Image (cartoon, rainbow, N blue to C red):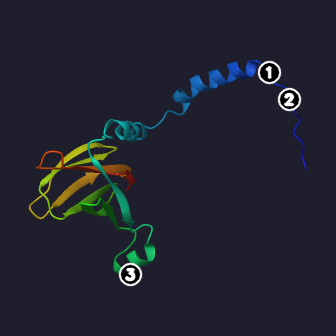
Amino acid sequence: MSHRPHHPFDPDDDLFLEELRALAPEGDPVPERVLAAARGTFTWRTIDAELAELAYDSAVDAERLLAVRSADTIRLLTFETSELTIELEVAAEGDHRRILGQLAPAAVGTIELRHVGGLLQLQTDELGRFTADDVEPGPVSLRWRGDQPGAAVTTEWVTI
């Protein structure tokens, strides 16, 4: 068994760590998509919308998913509040994702789909359905605003 010698604290250690901190962003910068996702988390978080929590994720329930479809291509997600359910089907299409969604009960309104590639504005139809193409993989969150004042729901962030 090797034994590492103990070195007493050296005041130059703090200087060395400061230099390392200054060099790290140059040699190993944080990817822009990670920064965008982090900004989105704080920018879009609002207190005026009810939070829809993730109630179902087929990636967690792989056995059930395999009985219906291939786990490699389709993922099902359900977000719920006491008044609204948002169901999503996420399909991998090359380097991007296609999202089919539906609100239950059906509601007309605007969906803001926040993802690392930016913000998509979508409209729900009279059956509460919506579609988003070319969504970049990574963290996503949705915000639904209905036609009635004060009607807003935001989902938690989930990685697709």
Residue on which the image places disc 2: 7
Q: Quadrant of residue 63?
A: bottom left
Q: Residue at x 33, y 64 (%)?
A: 77
CA neighbours of label 2 inside 10 A, class few (<14), some (14 to 19), many (20+): few
Amino acid at pointer 1: Asp
Residue on which the image places disc 3: 67
Element type at mark 1: loop
Q: CA distance from mark 1 to mark 3?
A: 61 Å
Q: Residue at x 70, y 21 (%)?
A: 14
Element type at mark 2: loop
Residue on which the image places disc 1: 10
The reply to whether callout 2 and callout 1 are in contact (CB within 8 Å) is yes
Q: Quadrant of residue 21?
A: top right
CA neighbours of label 3 inside 10 A, class few (<14), some (14 to 19), many (20+): few
- First in residue order: circle 2 vs circle 3: 2
Q: Quadrant of residue 3?
A: top right
Q: Residue at x 89, y 46 (%)?
A: 2
Residue 140 in picture, x, y percent from top left: 34, 50
Amino acid at pointer 3: Ala
CA neighbours of label 1 inside 10 A, class few (<14), some (14 to 19), many (20+): few
Residue 55 in picture, x, y percent from top left: 37, 64
Question: Going by the image, does 148 lie left or right of 69?
Answer: left
Residue 132 in picture, x, y percent from top left: 22, 55
- First in residue order: circle 1 vs circle 3: 1
Element type at mark 3: helix
